[in-house]
Amino acid sequence: MNLSELIHEFILALIEPGILVGSIGTVSFINTANSAFSLGLVFTCISLLYFALNADFIAAAQLLVYVGAINVLIVFAVMITDQSVSSDSEKRGIGYFTALGACSILFLTIVCIFHKINDFYSSSIHQSEYLKLNLFEQNDVQNIGYQLLNKFLVPFELASLLLLVALVGAINPARDEDEGKDIAENQKKSFVSSTSPRDKSSFF
Amino acid sequence: MNDINSFLSRLNSIINFSTILPKIILIVGLITIVITDLVNKGKNANFLYKIFLISTLVSMGILFYQLISVIAFEDLYTNNTFNNLFRFFILICSFISVLLSVDYVLCSKISLVEFPLFKISAGLGGMILSCATNLITIYVSLEFLALSSCFLSGYTKRDIRSNEASMKFLLMSGASSSSLLNDFSLLYGFSDGQVQLDNIIDKILFSQYIPIICISAAFILAGTAFKLSLFPFHQWTPDVYEGSPTPVVAFFSVTSKVAALCLFTRLFRLIFPYLSNEWHIVVELLAISSMILGNLIVVTQRSFKRMLAYSSISQIGYVMIGILAADLENGYASMITYRFIYIFMNLGTFARITPFSLRTGSDNIKDYAGLYMKDPVLTFSLVLCLLSLGGIPPLSGFFGKLYLFWHGWKAGLYLSVTVALVTSVISIFYYLKIIKLMLTKTTNLVDTLKTYENQKSLVSSIISTKLKSSVEMAMILCALASTLSGLFMDPIIKITRNTFF
């Protein structure tokens, strides 16, 4: 192994325990805020993994979206809910073992698939084809930007409209209705006296 | 004279060149609504609705103009008759459903502005979904439609049932679109990185990957059948329909179903032509179960909106027969014709329920008893629309169903057509039961109907005459369309014939 591969292995060996420790911490901390923070550790290590795999755009997107938005939202929600420390979960019922069995079967399946793919691609024919693809010389971000504004222009603009509508829709249930009520009251003052059958019904 | 000619020809070329011009007009309308509300600070709500109506009308006009002239192709869309017809339908749906929602929104003391905003965005999402040939565009526009519909269904936020409806809708639409996304990633992988639907078909090697293609067909079915409310994926329909505000139910009972039908047809037709035997059998099974389930459960319903929800489930079963019966010389004519007639029938029924529920505050079918004495216009038009939904001869629903079942019989779907006929009879029974309830003169009126007269006069004196008549305009339009379209069946069939691809 030459130097670059050695460095690569070293970095991966640093990142992977981080992911493992973070995920174990997420499921086994009793205090929910601790587990939310270790979820943040998992997301950060995953994005570092993407950097190491030469996918810089996805790494940046992962940092922005998962760590910056989703994890912050989770921590925020956890800290707002005022909960006592959860009771002991030492009793391991049938659900625990079922989940353990299902997850271990899934894990073994994934490991077998990866071994098969590894064997498939290790043979010399495929390696030369793989090197011919010349993936390392493309500039991913530039390519993505180019495609976004040329081929995928309509979904791109539509996604920005979607953001606008989602913002309006998220604020709509949450805002205070005083302004609307005043104007509505002004418009139908004499209606108020006769709204009794309507108010009593279950329709509104 | 020369100047006018050259100006007209340039205008002609602009309109013909840009196939996304109708959508751009809708987007401009959306932004105008937001800005107008910001400037006016909540007053003058009628103006906003007029903007919406004007923008819908203008884009309908342009779309119609494009339909009858030569159209240029673009990369992200293909512009054949199929797409244009669906876009036109969606615009009609948006237009009519806004007409009947103005009154409701004013009366129920909820904020006025966001309603046309969400309606425009849902219509926009539906339109782009109708002519998308790109996996990514399909997904983004589907999410657009689903999110806007979800916000619309949760609009009356003080009503608990509306909150429940929008929660259910959001969760289930999220689950179904995740299944659809899973399938898209399968298709993307197996076609070696192609996103355009045409390229995907070229590159999938059917000889090697048949089990995976079957799995991806199953995922697409799960994803799109949710929006169509086909049999195992219909559970959201009654609860969401009952909880959402009535004009919203009217809107997405037609719009999202039309858009989802277009998506379903396009995906199955384009991607899986070699598997047509397999997915034909599955869709036939789902259609039969939807018809049976919808029509049997509708008999036990006490709420009008739930009844309409179950009847729309069974109507989708009929329409699936039309999809299965598509062949070369007729295209999807039967399905599209029936869809067109169904829009008017359904919107007409909702246009009657909305003022009734505004005036009496009740949704129970029993409260409709003796309506004939209080409001003959409403009763008569509701009778017409319900009979058309059931499929009684001189009305257009009969002609639509006749054409659909005849096509199905010709294509060899004997079991489905038989089941459809039997369940149609069951649905006629139920509609006639409601009509009989309305038309009989009862001596002791129900409590809610006693206050009917008072409410009506107060409503009409407060709201300006323009708005009051918009619901009646919608009512009359739909009643006329659902009776007379049967006479104009032939030209409609001729237009919808050229839609096979």
Image (tube, coloured by chain):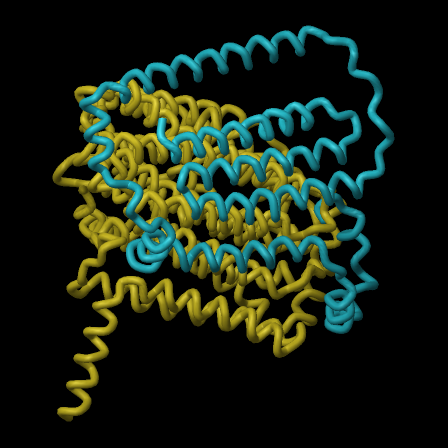
Chain colours: A cyan, B yellow
Q: Picture quarter containing residue B17?
A: bottom left
The residue lying at 17 percent from left, 36 percent from top is B202
Question: In this figure, what is the number of numbered marks?
Answer: 0
Say whether residue B382 is visible: no
Task: Using the image, determine if residue A125 lies above or below residue B161.
Answer: above
The residue lying at 33 percent from left, 43 percent from top is B135
Provide residue A138's location: percent of width, then percent of height.
30, 48
Instruction: Work out which quarter of the rendered image holds the N terminus of chain A and state it.
Output: top left
Provide residue B6's location: percent of width, then percent of height.
16, 85
User: Which of the two residues, B144 or B445, is positioned nearer the viewer here?
Assistant: B144
Q: Picture quarter containing residue B191?
A: top left
Q: Residue furthest front?
A: A3
Provide residue B271's location: percent of width, then percent of height.
24, 34
The residue lying at 45 percent from left, 57 percent from top is B94
User: Which of the two residues, B415 or B31, is positioned nearer the viewer here?
Assistant: B31
Task: Using the image, determine if residue B212 lies above or below residue A163.
Answer: above
Say whether residue B9 is visible: yes
Q: Residue furthest right?
A: A84
Provide residue B58's location: percent of width, then percent of height.
37, 70
Q: Picture quarter containing residue A82?
A: top right
The residue lying at 23 percent from left, 38 percent from top is A133
Q: Is residue B398 left or right of residue A101?
A: left
Task: Using the image, determine if residue B16 lies above or below residue B164.
Answer: below
Q: Is residue B296 left or right of residue B246?
A: left
Q: Is residue B50 left or right of residue B39?
A: left
